[in-house]
Amino acid sequence: MPRPEVQAPPEIFYNEVEARKYTTSSRIIEIQARISERALELLALPDDGVPKMLLDIGCGSGLSGETLTEHGHHWIGCDISKSMLDVALERETEGDLLLADMGEGLGLRPGVIDGAISISAVQWLCNADKSSHEPRLRLKAFFGSLYRCLARGARAVLQFYADNVKQSEMLVSFAMRAGFAGGVVIDWPHSSKAKKSYLVLTCGAPSVNTSLPKGKGQDGEACSDDDDDDDSDDDQTVGTYGRDRMKKRQKVNKNNRGKDWLLRKKEQMRKRGRDVPADTKYTGRKRKSRF
Ligand SMILES: C[S@@+](CC[C@H](N)C(=O)[O-])C[C@H]1O[C@@H](n2cnc3c(N)ncnc32)[C@H](O)[C@@H]1O
């Protein structure tokens, strides 16, 4: 299945039916809780027993926010899908909910947030869902407003699914331009299913405290609980931010596109209503280097 963000704009994709389906799937509940736990760990809040005011960007029906509540924190959640927020209200989640498009800026007062998480949401900003959408302007507005609303030294941990290396690069570069220090932490990089990418950002100039934590499973150890979901990153191999390293990896990916990749891309294009030739036994067949 192609990822939701290539199928329709978020407020359309997460309609009443999909919002309910999403929230009642035990598989999704379990995966989102596990990712939220990890995001909270990467947020590295001071262990002083004082509840913090956190932000959950793209909070949906409140699955990720529940983890914040379980850890004793207050939270504000924002989401563009009214149906998702309606389900969150029905479920009586603890957070304060805002119907808002993060691509237009978060509109919160400066310095009031102690930390932010976002689970499976910011990749939507890389798509232009309307003719008026310019992803670069939306990323600029989002990261600028996120930087402003965070207290100095606070962190934001944004778990995302990128369609390709360019999207990851775009997210990192707009975050850096807004003033953040940090980069991408990848857990379980060798597992196609369990691999997860987290943009770990600190508000303020780079220092010892802003050095990136290590991703899990970097040494090739196997993940015992691979997510059996469609959410694993597609050809995503970005490690911590470094331009040269990215260019090198991008090259490897480009040459690594096989038949499965081609069939997936064709399916995505069909879903978008494009005219795509039918699949045959020749589709994606490896050509000889010389005729
Ligand atoms: C996969 S759901 C994740 C929801 C929640 N974080 C969780 O873990 O269950 C992604 C959410 O991001 C929201 N989203 C996508 N684009 C958005 C935008 N531009 N502004 C605010 N929310 C957005 C969607 O509406 C959807 O609820």
Image (cartoon, helix red, strand yellow):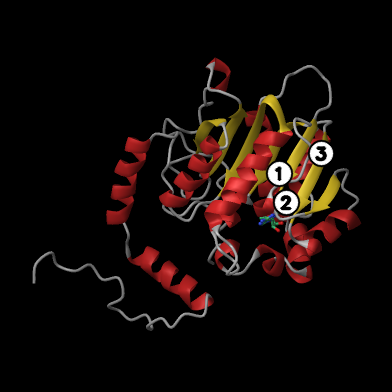
- Which residue lies at the image location 63% right of the left edge and 36% below the top edge? 157
Q: Could you tell whether 97 is left or right of 27 in the image?
A: right
Residue 75 badge: 3
Amino acid of disc 1: Ala
Front: mark 3 or 2: 3
Secondary element at tag 1: helix
- Which residue lies at the image location 60% right of the left edge and 43% below the top edge? 159
Please tell me which of labels 1 and 3 falls first in the chain: 1
Q: Which residue is mark 2?
A: 29
Residue 98, position as x, y percentages in the image = 82, 51
- Splitting the image into 4 quarters, where does residue 263 fall? bottom left
Quarter holding the C terminus? Answer: bottom left
Confirm or deny contact between disc 3 and disc 2 (CB under 8 A). Answer: no
Confirm or deny contact between disc 2 and disc 1 (CB under 8 A). Answer: yes
Q: Which residue is mark 1?
A: 33
* Cα separation between marks 1 and 3: 16 Å
Residue 27, position as x, y percentages in the image = 68, 54
Q: Nearer the viewer, residue 163 or 188?
A: 163
Residue 142, position as x, y percentages in the image = 64, 46
Q: Could you tell whether 209 is left or right of 43 in the image?
A: left
- Which residue lies at the image location 77% right of the left edge and 41% below the top edge? 108
Amino acid of disc 2: Ile
Secondary element at tag 3: strand
* Cα separation between marks 2 and 1: 6 Å
Q: Could you tell whether 290 is left or right of 117 in the image?
A: left
Q: Could you tell whether 197 is left or right of 158 in the image?
A: left
- Splitting the image into 4 quarters, where does residue 150 fall? top right
Category of crowding for the residue at label 3, using alpha-carbon neighbours closer than 10 angstroms: few (below 14), some (14–19), many (at least 20): many
